[in-house]
Amino acid sequence: MKHMFKGLVAATALASVLATGVVAEEPKRGGTLLTVLGTNVRNLNPAVQSGIVTGYPGAQLFAAPLRYDDSWTPQPYLAESWEVSDDGLSVTLNLVKNATFHDGQPITSKDVAFSVEVIKANHPFKAMFAPVETVETPDDHTAILKLSKPHPALMLAMSGQLMAIIPQHIYGDVAINEVKTHPRNNENVIGSGPFKLVEFKNGEHVIMERHEGFFMEGRPYLDKIVMRIISDPAARAIAYENGELHMGAFESLPRIINRLKKVDSLTVTPEGYGGIGPLDWLAMNTTKGPLKDVRVRKAIAYAVDKKFIMNALMQGTANESRTGIHPDSPFYNADVEAYEVDLDKANALLDEAGFPMEGGKRFGLTIDFGWPGVKPQVEYVKAALKKVGIEVEVRSSADFPTWAKRMGTMDFDMSWDTVFNWGDPVIGVHRTYDSTNIAKGVWSNTQGYANARVDELAAMAAVENDPEKRKALYAEFQAIIADELPVYHVNTLPYHTVYSDKVGNPPLGIWSTSSPIDMVYLKD
């Protein structure tokens, strides 16, 4: 299975003309993009650090082998072509011949092999490259990833911020497991991407400028990027409104989103987050008390009105989610039980489960939350469950680590959580339902859920290279989970990208700004 893409820019432009009948505006070269990060950055090197705040600057400083378009189709980047063997046990990357790091040193297959080794040793997403046993480097421009088993998730793992190619001649001076704390992660960064670091002042800004030696001719279009660090959403909103910011991403507060939608010069869109796959849900500990009974879990789902959450609390900015796979994913199965609010059904299930109503109460549960922004959802769940006789105690945590410890040790009944898919279900979905991943820390299977068929389906889907067969496996996977409800899936987290009418080619693919913005430009 060989994939070769050449003349990508011309082909994309032609496709646009054929589809719309409109000649696209010619990108303009030059200018400084004023953009924003919502929190401080711990690490600029995405080979050793996950998270969307690392991803934005990281995907500009470092290139990956592949990039994805908005239809989930891989496109060339550092790899001009690639080939997956018929048995799925090797993936050959044919690197572009003219790629250099920011210091002028050539990017070679040895850097690819080194980067994979660093990611495996340091990155928290262990499933991404776990089947990669070795990377062979027969010549400077050929890297062959040898796998212990077929691993279709590898394609998405080689894109966006997930597989940054870093220079061995810079980071190879320490042990592999020490690269996470390498001083060159945040200063004097030598990357492989379209932009190079000028200055990083945490709490203030990340400034980057065009890498003149970038391997894609004519790119990037921008001269410079200034990423201001503004943690206050209201302050970011004022900056957008006043024209002090051209673009930003991952805005999620409904009141801010709807406020900015009223500004004529701004576009505010939820497009471009399918790869990130952010979901809000109500997690339930299936190992203790009444929640061990699936009838109780279903009663809770029937008592909670997700339409109220989406319309009143999320103010129309979020979409419904029925499973642990994001609705924008090609593997999403919407044909599962939706649990439309039905208090009669909820009460009947609780009676059947042996929890009669006595004095207006059946039993009590706790509900936790890890950050203040979701307190309205938690308070609503408390009020909704009271209607069916479940008394809920809301437990706030002093800080995120406190909440994370409660989750990781399963010291909770219910918790409102936000979890990301990270492209392929193998990377970000399996971890929540895998019976071998119970209580392995926050964002593991903290529900204590175990189903042999779910484990079997996940294992089969993980090695199935045929997309339609994978889709069928994941459809059954989602149907079982929706029926057994270790998690009540509610809505997508309403991430939105904001950009002014001065911005051309905003990043609206599957990775949002966790992907290169070498094609973004500023209009006259």
Image (spheres, helix red, strand yellow):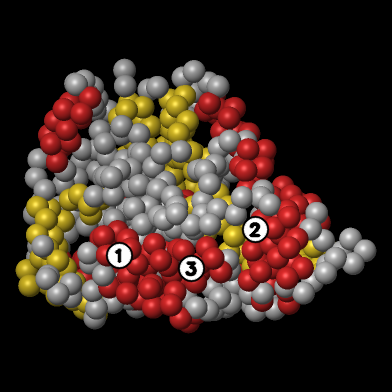
Label 3, on which residue? 480
Q: Is residue 346 toward the left or the right of residue 503 in the image? A: right
Image spot of residue 457 (x, y percent): 38, 73
Q: Is residue 286 toward the left or the right of residue 69 in the image? A: right
Label 2, on which residue? 301
Question: Which quadrant is the N terminus positioned in?
Answer: bottom left
Label 1, on which residue? 470
Tell whether label 2 touches label 3 (CB within 8 Å).
Answer: no
- Per the image, label 3 sits on a secondary structure element best described as helix
- Per the image, label 2 sits on a secondary structure element best described as helix
Is residue 144 in sight in this rendering? no
Q: Earlier in the sequence, mark 1 or mark 2?
A: 2
Give the camera-side residue of 337 and 468.
Answer: 337
Residue shown at the point (56%, 33%) measured from the top left: 257
Q: Amino acid at mark 2?
A: Ala
Q: Which class describes the residues within 10 Å of circle 3: few (<14), some (14-19), or many (20+)?
A: some
Image spot of residue 496 (x, y percent): 48, 38
Give the camera-side residue of 383 and 125.
Answer: 383
Residue shown at the point (32%, 74%) measured from the top left: 460
Q: Which class describes the residues within 10 Å of circle 1: few (<14), some (14-19), or many (20+)?
A: some
